[in-house]
Each structure stands twice: as C-alpha cells, then as structure tokens.
Image: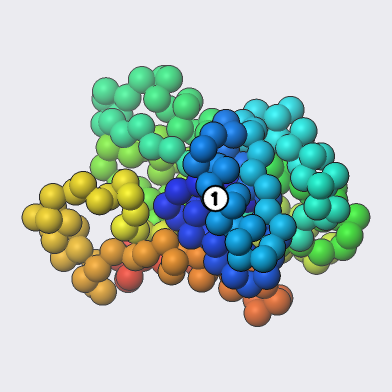
C-alpha cells in the first residue's frame, strides 16, 4: 500500500495486519517513521516491509512492485492512499500547485495500478481500493486541484473496474469526508464544532472507520462489488 506511515494509511496498514495480511508499504524515504511502522506490523505476526519509492513516478512504481513481488511472491490487494493538499482559491492557485497535487494524488494511482495489474492478471484475482474523497464528488472551496485529483481517481477506478473484471480483479473507491487525524489535532475547538455541525452524524470520522471500509472492499465479503464509490462521511450533503 502507499502512504502508510501516518493517519489514515497507518490505520489501514494496522487493520490489514490484524486480519493476517502481509503488508508491503512505501514512502518517499526510508526514515525512522517507516522503520517504526514496519516494526509495529511485524509485532502483529505478519510479514511486513517498508520501501522507499516515489509512486507518482512511473519507473519508480514499476521498480517498487518488482521488488515487492520478489520479496512477497504475489500482490493480492493494492491500497492507493498516497495524497497531498496544497490549497488555494483558483484565482491565486499556481500551475505548480495544481500539477503537484494532481501529479501526486492521481498519477500515483495510475502508476501503481499499471505496475500491479500484470501480476494480478496472471494470477486471476485481485482487489484494488483507491482512497478518494467526498471533495472529489461535491467539490470544495479552495481545493479545486485536490477535488480534480480525487474526481479523477473515481473516473479512473470505474474504467479499470470494467477493464479488469473479466480476470476477477475488482477496483473500488473509499471516499472519506472529514476524518480526525494528527493533521487535524491542532484545529481550534470552535472551528471543529462548526465543521461537525454540518455533518448529520455531528462528528468527524476516524482512520479506523476508513480502514474498516477498505477491509470490506478488499475482502471476499464484497466479492461481487466493483466500480463502487463508498462515501464514508457521516451523511455529508452531496457525498
């Protein structure tokens, strides 16, 4: 999986390990955080390894998957979670801001899907779960680049689902809404309360709740589900 060293990605990695899955994950560099996550996963009794890779770079993604296949033998599940934000109103957004966000969030999904597809095709099964966002469904102020990248993930996933279905490879999207992570910990309580008041369930989601959705879509519990976008947003309008 991509983007597993913090927040939602970390919760997903831990959840899959608790289900008995071996976990290969990556980040841009092999740093102390990656090693700590690796050790945390190994302590759960599964095989785990962190890799340094730029998954938005085609050659890097290809090399990563080649290395993972050599170490693990096969890839049954791909979770595409790598993502960034760089917010600005369109009138102030630079070309670099747009390219960086779309390049990281959307191109990484293409690169990793392209890299694992031959192995999944050969084995005749696989599940790809892409982490989208309700922002990719409804849009959001000052996030046109992020919304475009996440909307692109939805279109890409639905197309791949149709192309890959004949080989029992399923492709689905989890679209979280407002999720409380380390990144939101410093948000003032007044602002948090305002945001939560707009959510019918009156609270943010948790990384573990996103992870549960991923387990469902990756497992045989959803064996006849593909091309689905699953909003995990507490009933937010337009999701």
Residue at 43% over, 20% down = 96
- Residue at 70% across, 30% down: 60
Farthest residue toward the bottom? Answer: 221
Quadrant holding the C terminus? bottom left
Measured along the vertical axis of the image, is residue 146 above or below residue 199? above
Is 31 located above or below residue 99 in the figure? below
Q: Considering the numbered disc 1 on the image, is that residue within a helix, a strand or a loop?
A: helix
Q: Residue at x 64, y 58 (%)?
A: 42
Residue 7 showing in the rendered view? yes
Q: Position of residue 146 (x, y in %)?
A: 41, 40
Q: How is the image coloured?
A: rainbow
Q: Residue at x 33, y 39 (%)?
A: 143
Instruction: Name the one closer to the observer, 167 or 119.
Output: 119
Place of residue 236 in the rendered image (x, y in percent of width and height, measured from the top left): 30, 65
Horizontal side, residue 209 vs residue 70: left or right: left
Q: Tell me if mark 1 has few (under 14), some (14-19) or many (20+) residues whose alpha carbon lies within 10 angstroms of its own.
A: many
Q: Which residue is mark 1?
A: 37
Specify whether residue 106 is in view: no
> Quadrant of the rendered structure where residue 126 is?
bottom right
Whether residue 9 is situated above or below residue 51 in the rendered picture: below
The number of numbered discs placed on residues in the rendered structure image is 1
| In the displayed structure image, the side of residue 10 where residue 227 appears, left or right | right
Q: Nearer the viewer, residue 143 or 47?
A: 47
């Amino acid at each position: 999986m991509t983007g597993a060293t913090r927040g939602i990605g970390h919760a997903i990695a831990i959840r899959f390990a608790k289900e008995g899955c071996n976990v290969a994950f990556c980040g841009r560099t092999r740093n102390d955080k990656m090693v700590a996550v690796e050790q945390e996963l190994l302590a759960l009794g599964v095989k785990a390894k962190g890799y340094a890779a730029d998954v938005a770079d085609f050659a890097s993604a290809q090399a990563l998957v080649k290395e993972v296949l050599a170490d693990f033998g096969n890839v049954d599940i791909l979770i595409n979670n790598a993502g960034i934000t760089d917010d600005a109103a369109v009138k102030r957004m630079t070309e670099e801001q747009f390219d960086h966000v779309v390049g990281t969030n959307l191109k990484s999904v293409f690169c990793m899907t392209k890299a694992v597809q031959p192995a999944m095709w050969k084995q005749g099964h696989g599940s790809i779960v892409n982490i989208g966002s309700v922002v990719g469904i409804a849009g959001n102020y000052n996030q046109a680049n992020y919304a475009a990248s996440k909307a692109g993930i939805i279109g890409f996933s639905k197309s791949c689902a149709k192309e890959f279905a004949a080989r029992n490879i399923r492709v689905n999207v989890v679209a979280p809404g407002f999720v409380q992570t380390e990144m939101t910990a410093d948000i003032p309580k007044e602002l948090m309360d305002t945001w939560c008041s707009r959510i019918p369930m009156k609270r943010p989601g948790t990384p573990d709740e996103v992870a549960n959705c991923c387990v469902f879509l990756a497992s045989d519990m959803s064996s006849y589900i593909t091309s689905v976008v699953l909003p995990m947003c507490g009933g937010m309008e337009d999701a």
